[in-house]
Image (cartoon, rainbow, N blue to C red):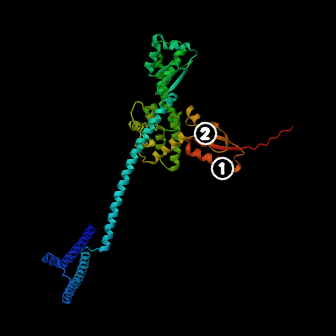
Amino acid sequence: MDIIAAAALIAVGIVGAAAVRARALGGAQRPPVAAAEQRPHSVELPPPATSNGGGREHSAELLRREEDLQIREAKLTKRLSEIDSQRQELIVELERVSGVSAVRAKEQLVEQMEDAARQDAAKRVRQIEDETKREADRRVRNILSVVMQRLAAGHAAETTVSVVQLSSDDMKGRIIGREGRNIRALETLTGVDFIIDDTPGAVVLSSFDGVRREIARMTLERLLQDGRIHPARIEEVYFLVKSDLEAHIVEVGEEGAIEAGVQGLHPELVKYLGRLKFRTSYGQNVLAHSVEVSRLAAMMASELGAGAKTARRAALLHDIGKAVTHEVEGPHALVGGDLARRYGESEAVAHAMEAHHNEVEPQTVEAVIVQAADALSGARPGARGESLDQYVKRLRDLEELATRHKGVDRVYAMQAGREIRVIVTPEEADDAAATLLSYEIAREIEKQLEYPGQIKVTVIRESRAVDYAR
């Protein structure tokens, strides 16, 4: 504030000096104006001289006027010099009062203006970044919605069904029952859709809940073995199977905890853990995935000197929210964290579970370790399967990408897309060009395709000499 005040004082002094100078200029020019006002018709030129006496009078008048102008010019020059002197004295006095020189005040004022400009520019940049992020989020949601619309049906058909084989198609009539009473009883009790007519020699069970689908499958298989299929028997078998499966789920959960080396889990958490056996993620069993992540996280934590016990427990339970996601709204990571807190797990474990998909920002080393272990388990070659359509598309994309190059004759994708062999025309590509071609194709695959592991590119150039003996 002192700097701004000093700059303002100096600016006021400069303006005041300019005003004084303007007044001086006005005062110096005022006599001619007054003289003009006294002679409203201006100076009348003398009539043309008719004699030598008239010419002398006219010359004397011009000389007097020239002398007057010279006197006024001298006074004006003296006054301007006085004004400049007063201006310098005023600037010196202002510098003394403010303690800042005029040059320094100007520099500081410029610096402050530059700082203000930078702050305005930074605010504008942040505003543009925020607008860009909002626009990007909106576009990403639109793209994802289109992708989900195109792929959801195929994915659901592959991951939400179980198939029960029949000895003959005649069994379908018994499963349906008189006027459909048997199949209605099965669907009402199990909450699963029974699809009878689509597949010869089989019944397709459709449901998003893997546990319900397993109960329905076991119920139908026992009814087929028993041979008695009617509503009363269906209900009896259903409750027997449900009881057996619940006990099996607890056993599976305990086995998973023991295999991962985690003790002291709440019985409800053990039950939820067992239910993960009937969930898959990209073809990977979620319970097996959780046990694998737990082992990886424990090893990584031990190497880094972090809490191995916390990392092990959080990694084993990190996907437990998937066992209840259809019952409770929200991302499975946050649902799992709430379950962990509810059943006595520490805040460190719950936080690492919630942060493994960045629903919350990781705040501990263990949370980052669980993220890394989860990514390693999912990215391991062969851990997660692909649909047949995705598999065929990947092979086709590889072959089309290599075929676009000049001199390529044939392309074969081999070993489930882990290797492609490119056969070139020997007349169009020499050995050096074949080496360069393998490099170019490999780089294009890296840039344009997504794939697990690595893909080997082999370029084959064959020269044949043919002749005939006659």
Contact between labelled residues 2 and 1, with CB atoms less than 8 Å apart: no
Crowding at dot 2, Cα within 10 Å, few <14 / some 14-19 / many 20+, comes out as few
Q: Residue furthest top?
A: 178
* Badge count: 2
Q: Quadrant of residue 359?
A: top left
- Kindly give the residue lying farthest to the right in the view shown: 470
* Left or right of 342, for residue 25: left
Query: Marks 1/2: CA distance?
Result: 18 Å
Dot 1: element? helix
Disc sitting over residue 436 in the figure: 1
Amino acid at pointer 1: Leu
- Residue type at mark 2? Glu
Which quadrant: the C terminus? Answer: top right
Residue 282 seen in the figure: yes
Q: Residue at 50% across / 35% down in the picture? A: 257
In the displayed image of the protein, which residue is found farthest to the front?
Answer: 50
Coordinates of residue 51 in the picture (x, y in percent): 20, 88
Q: Is residue 34 above or below residue 199?
A: below
Image position, residue 17 (x, y; %) = 23, 75
Q: Quadrant of the N terminus?
A: bottom left
Of 270 and 426, the residue lying toward us: 426
Q: Residue at x 58, y 37 (%)?
A: 394
Direction from residue 364 to residue 453 in the image, left or right: right
> What residue would you read off at disc 2?
400
Circle 2 — which element? helix
Residue 308 in sight: no
Instruction: Depth check: give the residue in front, 37 or 231.
Output: 37
Image coordinates of residue 314 in percent, x first then y, are 46, 41
In the image as oriented, which residue stretches furthest toward the left?
38
Whole-percent x, y for residue 243 in the image = 46, 22
